[in-house]
Image (cartoon, rainbow, N blue to C red):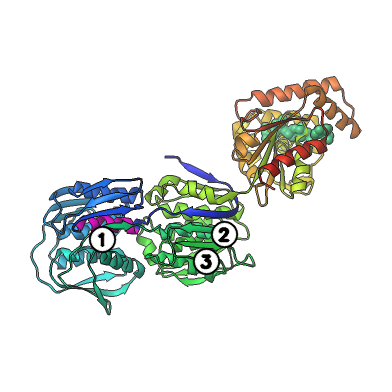
Amino acid sequence: MSAFLDLPPARCAQGSARLPGSKSISNRVLLLAALAEGDTHIHDLLHSDDVARMLEALEALGVRWERTGAHDYVVHGTAGAPFPVREAELFLGNAGTAFRPLTAVLALMDGEYRLRGVPRMHERPIGDLVEALRQLGARIDYLENEGYPPLAIHPPAPVSVETVRIRGNVSSQFLSALLMALPLLGRPITVEVVGELISRPYVALTLALMARFGVELVERDGRFHYDGQARYRSPGEVYVEGDASSASYFLAAGVLGGGPVRVEGVGRTSLQGDVRFAEALEALGARVAMGENWIEASAPENGRLRAFDLDLNHIPDAAMTLAVVALFCEGPSRLRHIGSWRVKETDRIAAMATELRKLGATVEEGPDFLVITPPERLQPAAIATYDDHRMAMCFSLAAFGDIYVRILEPECVNKTFPEYWQVYRSVVRPVPVVAIDGPTASGKGTVAARLAERLGWHYLDSGALYRLVALAALRRGLATEDAAMLARLARDLDVRFSGDRILLAGEDVTEAIRTEDVSAAASRIAVHGTVREALLARQRAFRRRPGLVAEGRDMGSVVFPDAELKVFLTASVEVRAERRFKQLIDKGMSASIERLREELEARDRRDRERAIAPLQQCPDALRLDTSHIGVEEAVEAIFDWVRTRGLA
Ligand SMILES: Nc1ncnc2c1ncn2[C@@H]1O[C@H](COP(=O)(O)OP(=O)(O)OP(=O)(O)O)[C@@H](O)[C@H]1O
Ligand SMILES: Nc1ccn([C@H]2C[C@H](O)[C@@H](COP(=O)(O)O)O2)c(=O)n1
């Protein structure tokens, strides 16, 4: 598992994303198919951790299934009979969509089962479901803490109640699980929801899928009636819709990155409540279009997103995406009625508030709401993901704030969307970088600055940063070997680039950093990994829309390894010594060409031979030798490469 993933600042988003199958539908369909009479051929099933847990559980319970294609499965139903294996220990990870429905179904079967999960699963309540199942005769013990998994399930006791009561204000999955298990009773029964029912669309999804498998419940006044007759029968084939919650990241990307971005796999006829995320985006001013099986989103006509105050109870998962979108809205936004976030993969309200604050937002956190005020400008941050796939996916959108975003433990997306980062990269285009590296006096600075001007992009003279540290160190009498002190100096450097002037603690040092003393010292301090590390974030902060031309020694190899165009600019040592000589003479300084050449060769050697980030031509860099061409010709050559790559 990689420890982190650095997402570069995003320039725009465009294209289409094919969504993976819905997790909610995949796990419901697998269970219903297992309970049904006949074989069910399931297409487009999601491949993810949570679905893998359900498949493993069914196998352990003796339900036969086979994989028949990349995302195709056939499940051989048990026709409502108890599952063949009557004693089993199941590990269900952190999959609520597996844990809750299996608890309900197994509690009404005639076996001995133990259900466990990851530590977080054991912190997620299940008491309301167990309470309801006990009314039906279920015998369930809590193995650790009252009201929480892990559970021991024993054969049920016979009871003859006609109405079961269940609370619906913590998770609607409890009601869904109970409803799916009702046909196992084989007699009429009514389920009454006590108090509020949150996340209603998920219950509607459950009812629709049960109906596809032949069991229609009648709903009246918050009560659900099972007639005691209907039995699950396979519909033969089932196609799993794309995941509507996963669609939210790409639709939001379309809005934040211009768009249009189209998601394929969900649309107007979707069973999933989270398609209504598109309405929320429209309320913010975004342009949204929808077809039978697709949704498309683009930025508002005027490019401005309205702040919002929305009740998001009906789209609890996709609502997380809105919390990050709020960073780009005009003013404070309020997300209401999101109390269910507290008992999800992590306490999502607390986690969201903590991570949004890292980006510079002001966040007010309540028991079931968040108020998010965006900062003037986002600040780069390392985002903790709390083993929660949605934290990782929605925070990827912060990259639209012209910042690098570090996502910690990015593989947590495997829970529902293992290919998320690949799909993200296919839709979200980073702010482009032209990285120009080369030896001293090859003309990098001159060429890069002119190219940046021509493109209307930002310009980074990375050598200036090393020179600034060198100047500050020389002034303080620090030894060029003192890596720790130099790194601290580099981190705390008070630098401002203002047009073509460079200010150190307010003082204009544009000329002072160009002396030969400073050049030599800069080359010496640049060998320290700690100094390079301290300057990394400063250099990356230059990568802003619409693009960056960066020059130095390790632009293409270390600082911007994903640069769209890498150029190795060079010239013979004689030509470079002559250029430097001319530069000094023009400035009215005396110089010896022989001495300059020796110094230049010494710097080249040091830059090339140092252990960390040595000067070298990247394998994917284009080489441009300027020994016999002028500045304009060099700029023109690189500009052509930029154009050929479609960057300008
Ligand atoms: N074809 C050319 N390309 C670039 N610069 C040239 C060319 N011909 C002459 N020069 C001149 O060479 C001098 C050195 O260029 P510049 O300072 O841009 O090099 P550099 O590679 O950035 O050096 P350093 O790494 O030491 O900062 C400048 O005065 C520039 O005008
Ligand atoms: N990316 C960079 C840029 C510069 N350096 C070091 C090596 C140079 O000798 C010194 C000054 O750079 P210049 O202004 O001549 O481009 O700074 C580096 O190691 N990596």
Q: Quadrant of the N terminus?
A: top left
Give the main secondary structure of the magenta stretch: helix
| Measured Cα–Cα span from mark 1 to mark 3 | 32 Å
SS at badge 2: strand
Q: Is residue 31 magenta?
A: yes
SS at badge 3: strand
Most foreground residue, 628 or 439: 628
User: Which residue is most to the left?
Assistant: 158
SS at badge 1: loop
Position in image of residue 403 (x %, y %): 60, 51
Q: Which mark is residue 260?
A: 2
Q: Is mark 3 within 8 Å of ligand 2?
A: no
Mark 2 crowd level (few <14, some 14–19, many ≥20, 10 Å Cα) = many
Q: Does 592 sit above or below residue 192?
A: above
Position in image of residue 356 (x %, y %): 51, 57
Which callout, 2 or 3, points at the residue further toward the start of the chain?
A: 2
Image check: 342 left or right of 633? left
Q: Which mark is residue 627?
A: none
Which callout, 1 or 3, points at the residue further toward the start of the chain?
A: 1
Task: Tell me the residue that label 3 is attached to.
Answer: 289
Q: Nearer the viewer, mark 1 or mark 2?
A: 1
Q: How many numbered badges does the structure rendering display?
A: 3
Position in image of residue 125 (x %, y %): 28, 60
Contact between labelled residues 3 and 2, with CB atoms less than 8 Å apart: yes
Q: Give the extent of the magenta segment.
A: 24-36
Q: Quadrant of ligand 2?
A: top right
